[in-house]
Image (cartoon, helix red, strand yellow):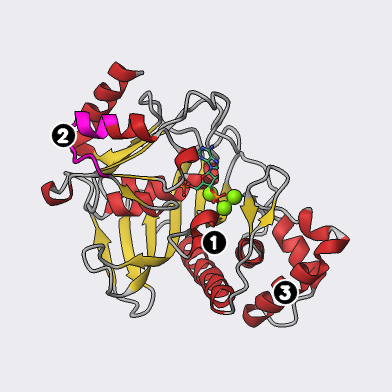
Amino acid sequence: MAYELEKQVAIASVIGAIKLCTQIQNDCLVAAIEKPDFSPVTIADLGAQAIICQAIAADFPQDAVVGEEDAKLLRQPHMSEQLEQIASYVRVHIPETSAETVLEWIDRGNGQVGGRFWTLDPIDGTKGFLRGDQYAIALALIEDGEVKLGVMGCPALPLDLNQPQGERGVLFVAVRGQGTTQIALKSGVSQPILGARTANKHNFRSTESVESRHGNLPLQRAIAQAVGMAPEPLSIDSMAKYAVVARGEAALYLRLPWAEYPDYRENIWDHAAGAIVLEEAGGRVSDMYGKPLEFAANAKMLNNRGIIASSSDIYDAVLDALQEKV
Ligand SMILES: Nc1ncnc2c1ncn2[C@@H]1O[C@H](COP(=O)(O)O)[C@@H](OP(=O)(O)O)[C@H]1O
Ligand SMILES: [Mg+2]
Ligand SMILES: [Mg+2]
Ligand SMILES: [Mg+2]
């Protein structure tokens, strides 16, 4: 099968990163470090990027990685304690790793888009991770301008949203043309997902970010209502929203920009893995004007605005409703 080795390497490294994040959470060491753009990052984001970049470097040394994080912050003298903490967690997975090697692995994520490359969000939904809510570890392979493989780990996501007390921790794996599979992290049970061809009428609702700054909530809700959905959306952090639509637990994920932030552009690592997980589960993804998402031009999707991700049967109605309101 195409992309078999890439898939196995991606799965193993995302599982390694999930273990690191869970260990840091269990040790109560989750704390926000402020990045120069004032957004939060944690030692888990940085450690997860180190583990995944190391794995890609080992098996695919020619491949660039376009990752969210870099080691600039960690190289500052006042960050030496955090750097040592990260190195000690990375050593659990890769023995004898030095702090300097951790910095080098993190900086392997400074690659450029173009040709064949990976994009990595070591923790998507850092704010959710800090709150103890949903987060995702998302890795995608892009080739010839198209996402070919996506692996998304959702350590806090229930296997079934209708059973919130049930087992949690899911991996979503999608390969172009081969479908999407959900793998339960604890039991290893895997099953194909095709919940986004047609909307499930029992879950005819939308999902959106928890963070009100990340999306125009009133407009998103107006569109959901215009296509007949209940007014109360499912608020979930991270790319787990794509997975929830892929499983048919919601029919629509809208991410519409606020008029106050006309210059905000989405990052490729915030969407690549989620988009292929949803498309291979039968769904549709585009920007708010119906344009395909551009993953290979720049790390920021400069020519796209907003996101529509939905089950296929309602996509046209959503796009029409949106064009009437913008
Ligand atoms: N003003 C804004 N509008 C849209 N997205 C934003 C934003 N500010 C930050 N983000 C992105 O929102 C992502 C989280 O998504 P969600 O809101 O769906 O949980 C963040 O990813 P990170 O957490 O990886 O930094 C960040 O890239
Ligand atoms: Mg971030
Ligand atoms: Mg992100
Ligand atoms: Mg992130």
Q: Earlier in the sequence, mark 2 or mark 3?
A: 3
Crowding at mark 2 (Cα within 10 Å: few <14, some 14-19, many 20+): few
The amino acid type of the residue labelled 2 equals Gly
Q: Between marks 1 and 2, how big is the CA–CA gap?
A: 34 Å
**Position of residue 17 in the picture relative to residue 148 (left or right):** right
Q: Kindly identify which residue carries mark 1.
A: 130
Measuring from the top left, give residue 263's x and y in whole percent: 58, 26
Disc 3 designates what residue?
85
The answer to whether marks 1 and 2 mark residues whose Cβ atoms lie closer than 8 Å is: no
Q: Is residue 49 visible?
A: yes
Residue 226: percent from left, percent from top: 20, 28
Q: Tell me the magenta residue range.
A: 222-232
Q: Please, is residue 321 above or below residue 114 in the view?
A: above
User: Who is closer to the viewer here, 324 or 230?
Assistant: 230
Which of the 4 image quarters holds residue 182?
Answer: bottom left
- Frontmost residue, 255 versus 248: 255
Against 93, residue 235 (above or below) is above
